[in-house]
Image: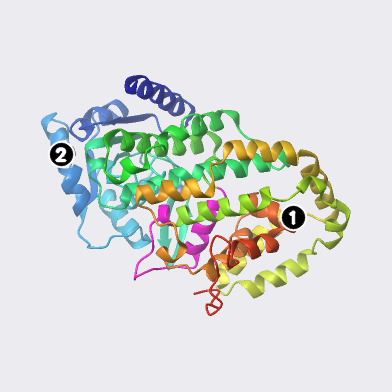
Amino acid sequence: MAQDKLSEDERLLEGAVKAADQTRLVRVGRGLRHEAVSAFEELFGRSPAVIVADGNTFAAAGRDVVDSFRQAGHACLEPYVFDLPDLHAEYPHVETVERFLASADAIPVAVGSGTINDMTKLASHHLGRPYLCVATAASMDGYTAFGASITREGSKQTFNCPAPKGVVADLEVIEAAPEGMNASGYADLLAKIVAGADWLVAEALKVEPVDATAWEMMHSRLRTWVGNPDGIRHGDSEAVHCLILGLLVSGLAMQWTRTSRVASGADHQFSHLWDMQNHVHNGRAPSHGFKVGIGTLASSALYERLFTQALDELDADSLAARWPELDSIEADIRARFDLPELTAKALEETEAKYVDRDAIREQLLQVRAVWPALRERLQAHLVSFDELTDCLTAAGCPVRPEQIGISPARLRESYRQAYCIRRRFTILDLAARTQLFEPALEEIFSPHGRWPIDSSDGSHTG
Ligand SMILES: [Zn+2]
């Protein structure tokens, strides 16, 4: 049985690699760090290699990767190993890697997780070189994704750059990843469920069609991949295997569609918002996956509120008549954001997705027409808020916003802000356009709602 399941996954992964246009090779298995050289040679022949790692990832896998090259008689230059206690993907470090690589005539091999991969990805791109990644944790879906998430001048930005030519994921190393890392990747993968729902909404409202190939890649096995959260916490071999497969396929699906739509909806907008606000908790930024996990619950809570509404009975005319002009929305944004870059971003994105009253009326008529079928489709696709909470808890992820330093009052405000910072059509847009956003938030944060707001907690920006 387990054999069948894996071979089905292997076929899916193979198809996803074929569909992707940047990554040519993905290998997942136990002990593969010792065979990194064979993946490298398949892609780059006998070109010399050079490893980029940090102290932890070098000890966990990098040293064995270097040995695999040396034993094969394959030129492998002296590695670059970061020696910093708390390494983050920051632009000056990218420049350090770039300077180092510029002096080394070799193809980079990034040995690490998000931080090392993203920094090597961008530095390699600047030098016009391809690279190989050896993944050391199932911590996020960025291994096979294009773009690198790097902090520059205090704000986290996504830089355009190609995905690696190849990824080798050694399950022995990943199973033993530091606490919280695989949990974080689990939340990033679980989020694809609500992200998928957002795509269904966008398609039903004729905003953005679903790409059938990407949908099949992402969703045909997703329930299985996220089906053993307990196993993630305990480093169970099969659970971790499923997790890393799902994360790698997410990145490949993004390569296929050339956008992140397949892997990111309102769930990720919360996380992006908190990144842009430079949110820290106990002195450090919570992991990407942990922020996305709370965003996933936030999205789910809103879906569940909207499911109680008879959107097939909307009064399109009167709602359209009350739809605000762009001027007043912009004034609201200026009042809602205090960081200048964030305000500018919110204005730009909101303007890009603004539609006038006629268009709103048309869209609301479409909502009316499709709602019963759409709701049914969404309910069949989604899992409940309670089940998501149970899965995240079992995997070892935070489920209350306070666990990542976000008060309920701030989360409430985050809904409104997250809605503004991206043009992508999500459940947040459906709530706004049906003018059910405020009533839904009232419920979600009421004393009997998901996250009651303590009336003494008036802080909206925390
Ligand atoms: Zn993500």
Q: Which residue is mark 2?
A: 64
**Which tag is nearer the camera, tag 1 or tag 2?**
1
> Residue 57 placed where, x, y %?
22, 48
In the figure, is residue 429 to the left or right of 192?
right
Q: Secondary structure at mark 1?
A: helix
Q: Residue at x 83, y 45 (%)?
A: 365
Q: How many marks?
A: 2
Q: CA distance from mark 1 to mark 2?
A: 55 Å
Image quarter in which the N terminus is found: top left
> Given the current orientation, which residue lies at the most extreme front position?
448
Q: Which residue is mark 1?
A: 433
> Residue 293 placed where, x, y %?
46, 53
- Is residue 424 in view? no
Residue 297 tag number: none
Mark 1 or mark 2: name the one nearer the start of the chain: 2
The three-letter amino acid code for the residue at tag 1 is: Arg
Q: Is residue 341 above or below residue 61?
A: below
